[in-house]
Amino acid sequence: MKKENPAVLYGLIGAAILIIVGLTMQMYIVSVMKKAIDSGAAISPMKFVGISVLSFLLIVTVFIVCLIKAIKDYRKNNPDYTYKKLVGQGLLATLIIAFVSTAFSLLYSEVIDPGARNKTIELTVQVYENINMPDEQKEKMIDAIKNQDPVKQTVTSLSLILFFGLIVSLISASVLNKSNKTFPDNPNNLS
């Protein structure tokens, strides 16, 4: 019986958690914007900053925990591991998280709820119209929101996720690589 790869398992778990967090945060933000527009009240920019920071921290935590668990389980199941293999496990988990969550995001925006993106843009524009700021700044922000390129955003987010995953994998693998493990190709190994 073949053992399952921990990177695949934790990559799928991480992607599922990120999808749930993303959908929950999107519903919450849309709800807050609708309430503010319906009541005519201005939305506190600090509230959005707080939500964004909280979301970011939650996503980073899930990501790091999944990568570390994948590397730890691989190390435990394979006593002949190498640093390169540990990093590879972290990168494989990163790829799975990135591609599954991005694929779901595209599926959601194109098939499940194709109007969600436009609704969110309209609500965001209405929110910015109610914010007290100079008209010039307000117009620039509204133009930037209306002219977002989904393909560019997808490529940028995939690139950032893969870069972050590489950094976390390199650091995690170096920390989790046992210092007393001997490597036959290490020139400094005197034994």
Image (cartoon, rainbow, N blue to C red):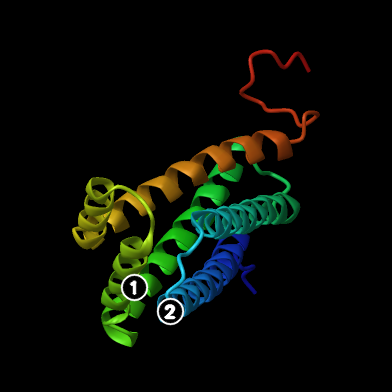
Residue lying farthest bottom?
112
Tell me if residue 124 comes above or below residue 73 in the rendering.
below
Q: Nearer the viewer, residue 47 or 16?
A: 47
Residue 114 showing in the rendered view:
yes
Q: Quadrant of the N terminus?
A: bottom right
Relative to the observer, which residue lies in front, 148 or 123? 123
What x and y, as percent, mark residue 95? 45, 56
- Identify the residue at image location x=40%, y=76%: 37
Q: Residue at x 27, y 82 (%)?
A: 115
Confirm whether residue 82 shows in the render: no
Bin the neighbour count of mark 2 within 10 Å (Cα to Cα): few under 14, some 14-19, many 20 and up.
some
Choose top left, top right, bottom left or bottom right for residue 117: bottom left
As helix, strand or loop, the secondary structure at mark 2 comes to helix
Q: Which residue is mark 2?
A: 34
The residue type indicated by label 2 comes to Lys
Mark 2 vs mark 1, CA separation in Å: 7 Å
Q: Are marks 2 and 1 in contact (CB under 8 Å)?
A: yes
Q: Which residue is drawn at the image coordinates 69% and 56% (left, top)? A: 69
Q: Earlier in the sequence, mark 2 or mark 1?
A: 2
Q: Quadrant of residue 3?
A: bottom right
What residue sits right under mark 1 in the picture? 123
